[in-house]
Amino acid sequence: MEECVGQGLIRQIGVCNFSTKKLGDLLNQASIAPMMNQIELHPYLQQEDMLRFCRERDVLLTAYSPLGSVDRPKGMKKQDEPSLLENPVIVEIGAKHKISPAQVLIGWALRRDTVVIPKSVNQERLQQNLAAADVVLDDEDMQAIKSLDMKYRYVDGGFFAAPGSGYTVAGIWDE
Ligand SMILES: NC(=O)c1ccc[n+]([C@@H]2O[C@H](COP(=O)([O-])OP(=O)(O)OC[C@H]3O[C@@H](n4cnc5c(N)ncnc54)[C@H](OP(=O)(O)O)[C@@H]3O)[C@@H](O)[C@H]2O)c1
């Protein structure tokens, strides 16, 4: 990837689903540091250690599945996944600011200085999600959302660690 930068084929290097351990190892070896790590981030998986590490080392974070990835294929979902969009704390903050729960979740990601990539195929929801760029959550909101962290992964890694892939779930997250 560094050679690709040198050849002008790409401008920046980004990585995905890197743990702080893998990112640290890479930063120690790389001559061109990755600009971005794309990982799952939302109020149920806040990853404060990763946030701190990336701030210190000047790596941006992209938050994937920020709304709870409701429409993943059945084979990738667990039974009884907790809903982010219906969480009472999120719903209440939305009512307070007169915005939707999805906009609260996007506003939360922005307030943490992360890039956030909600997915929608619906025009109205796309517009609503883009409009969330103007959402400003206050400290009280952020404090309330802080209490929702339960280190819960919607994307648990099983898909990446398919037989023959050479990966294991524990090895992916270094947990
Ligand atoms: N790098 C990785 O390993 C990785 C892993 C997972 C995901 N991702 C990427 O992350 C992005 C988003 O993640 P995701 O698709 O898993 O989940 P997500 O964005 O958390 O959730 C998408 C779901 O939320 C719904 N939705 C969107 N906007 C909404 C709104 N305003 N109100 C209510 N519901 C809304 C969508 O329905 P409609 O479409 O019907 O609106 C869809 O069912 C995607 O681009 C995906 O490719 C990357």
Image: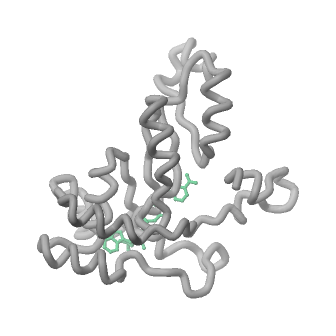
Q: Nearer the viewer, residue 73 or 39?
A: 39
Is the image coloured rainbow, by chain, by secondary structure, or in one colour? one colour
Q: Residue furthest top?
A: 6
Q: Nearer the viewer, residue 25 or 127?
A: 25
Residue 75 horizontal side relative to residue 148, left or right = right
Residue 88 at x, y = what percent? 31, 83
Q: Quadrant of residue 42?
A: bottom left
Residue at left offset 65%, top offset 29% = 26
Residue 74 at x, y = what percent? 61, 80
Residue at left offset 40%, top offset 68% = 67
* Image quadrant, ligand 1: bottom left
Say which quadrant the N terminus sits in: top right
Residue 20 at x, y = what percent? 60, 42
Q: Quadrant of residue 55?
A: top left
Number of disc labels = 0
Q: Residue furthest bottom?
A: 80
Above or below, 172 against 100 in this view is above
Q: Nearer the viewer, residue 171 or 66?
A: 171
Above or below, 147 against 118 in this view is below
Q: Quadrant of residue 76?
A: bottom right
Residue at left offset 80%, top offset 52% = 167
Say which quadrant the C terminus sits in: bottom right
